[in-house]
Amino acid sequence: MESISRIVKSEPFHVQAYVHIQNYLLENKFLPGERLTESGLANMLGVSRGPIREAIRMLIHDGLLTQKGVHIYVFDPTVDDVVDLYLCKERLEPLGAKLSAQNMSQVNKDALIEIVNNTKKALENNQKREVVTFNTKFHDIVVQSSGNKQLIQFMNLIHAKNLYMRNNILSNYSRRDNFFEEHVRIADAIVNGNGNQAELEMKQHVQNDINMLDTIFKSKQKDDFI
């Protein structure tokens, strides 16, 4: 295991431990289904097991870790887990897009356009990590600009798990130009204040992701059968 930034005293140890372990999970430093131990994580981060225990509790709440008996494992999502999460996105994100078209500030509209432009450059340069980063920023700014606190809270609950699945399970699959064109249409509708169109475009965007998942898993099942 490569070295990790060690914890300092600038903020509560359990919060820092949570952030460090979460980043490792999201960056695919641990394998899905891998067993983790308090002592191992404590040695890695240079803290006692107390903060690690609290960080693990928080990550179990996020759904990034699971507990089976006394043992802790990295979340290893099933097909149903992935599809269920995207079905939630299909209901929530279109509403976020509609509300963002009504409530997004000019500053965030400019930021949204910049994200779209940066995504295009990253695609042209085949910068996969940057594409994922800008994709995440795109969806985040749409939700955060909705102005609906409950919607933002609900989306925050599945944000980490969604990013984990995208980075660890779906990292080798991308709709590339197709998803980018969809982002352009969503952004245009939001910037122009067309809430109904933004809602329709986002709904189709997420539905296309679900269709891609269906294709991926059918292909995997075929390979497993062969």
Image: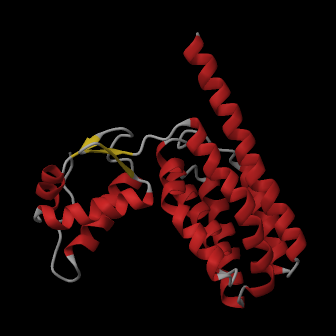
Q: Residue extending furthest top?
A: 226
- Horizontal arrangement in the rendering, residue 177 relative to residue 57 (left or right): right
Residue 65 at what x, y percent from top left?
36, 51
Q: Nearer the viewer, residue 150 or 163?
A: 150
Identify the residue at image location x=18%, y=70%. 7
Which quadrant of the view contains residue 5?
A: bottom left
Identify the residue at image location x=43%, y=60%. 62
Which quadrant of the view contains residue 44?
A: bottom left
Q: Residue extending furthest bottom?
A: 106
- Horizontal arrangement in the rendering, residue 69 relative to residue 6 (left or right): right
Question: Is 121 rendered above or below residue 86?
Answer: below
Residue 209 at what x, y percent from top left?
71, 47
Identify the residue at image location x=68%, y=68%. 117
Residue 66 at what x, y percent from top left?
37, 48
Residue 33 at what x, y percent from top left?
36, 38
Q: Nearer the viewer, residue 67 or 8?
A: 67
Instruction: Kindly tell me whether residue 43 is visible in this rendering.
Output: yes
Which quadrant of the view contains residue 95?
A: bottom right
Q: Nearer the viewer, residue 172 or 46?
A: 46
Question: Is 174 rendered above or below residue 217?
Answer: below
